[in-house]
Amino acid sequence: MKHPNIKTTGSGLSKALLVGVGLSLSLTLPSQSVAQQGQGLPAEVFKVETSPLNHIITTVGTLRANEAVILRPEINGRVSSILFREGETIEQNQLLIELDNTTFEAELAQAQAQANLSRTEYQRAADLLERRVGSQTDRDTRLAQLRVSEAQVQLAKAQLAKTTLLAPFSGEVGLRYVTPAILSLRVKTWLKSSTLMR
């Protein structure tokens, strides 16, 4: 039995299906739009790291030394060793040059031996005076001789110390004007040393 209000033609059925599809599409579009809104726009992510920033300025100029000195020997002697290289950075009181110190070591040993003898003679004279056997004059003479011998020891030590050249301050060594085994005179320049301004 056919209902009077329902058409069973093929065209009518296709129209009904199309209307149904249209409704379903219209109902699902809003859900897809919401999903797209939740995803957002694409973005690039970078990791931030710290690194030193070097300020470098390239320029042309002339370097001037903050401190400079010309080193010369205080005594005559033969150079035995050179303990630095030209352009090397050195520290204050660093040993740079040594002279042959054989003679000065012998003079120091001689002065020390004489000082020991003078000390013994003075002690003997002081003991005799305490026992009222010796004289005051003899003891004073021995004491004066002891003082002279001790001064000779200090002089020999000072002469021996002059056979070594120490850096007066920290800096850079310039050109050297001596070589090992040559005779170095007091008027001759050994080397130039300087520090650069910072």
Image (cartoon, rainbow, N blue to C red):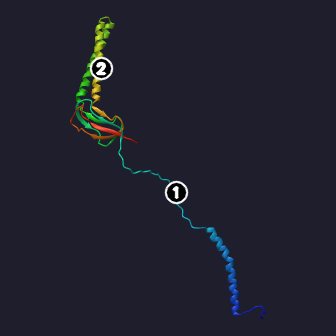
- Tell me the residue at 32%/10% (across/down): 127
At which x and y percent is residue 111?
A: 26, 22
Is residue 113 depicted above or below 194 in this figure? above
At which x and y percent is residue 75?
A: 25, 29
- Residue count near mark 2 (Cα–Cα under 10 Å), binned few <14, some 14–19, many ≥20: some
- Residue count near mark 1 (Cα–Cα under 10 Å), binned few <14, some 14–19, many ≥20: few
- Quadrant of the image occupied by residue 77: top left
Structural distance between the alpha carbons of marks 2 and 1: 73 Å
Is residue 130 depicted above or below 194 in this figure? above
Is residue 151 depicted above or below 12 in this figure? above
At which x and y percent is residue 184?
A: 22, 33
The image's mark for residue 112 is none
Placement of the N terminus among the 4 image quadrants: bottom right
Check disc 1 and report its element: helix, strand or loop. Answer: loop
Nearest the viewer among 4 and 129 is 4
Nearest the viewer among 198 and 53 is 198
Nearest the viewer among 78 and 69 is 69
- Tell me the residue at 28%/41% (across/down): 175
Residue farthest to the front? 61
- Quadrant of the image occupied by residue 156: top left
Q: Earlier in the sequence, mark 2 or mark 1?
A: 1
Q: Which residue is mark 2?
A: 151
At which x and y percent is residue 27?
A: 69, 77
Task: Examine the rendering and report whether any part of residue 141 can be seen.
Answer: yes
The image's mark for residue 48 is 1
What amino acid type is highlighted by mark number 2? Ala
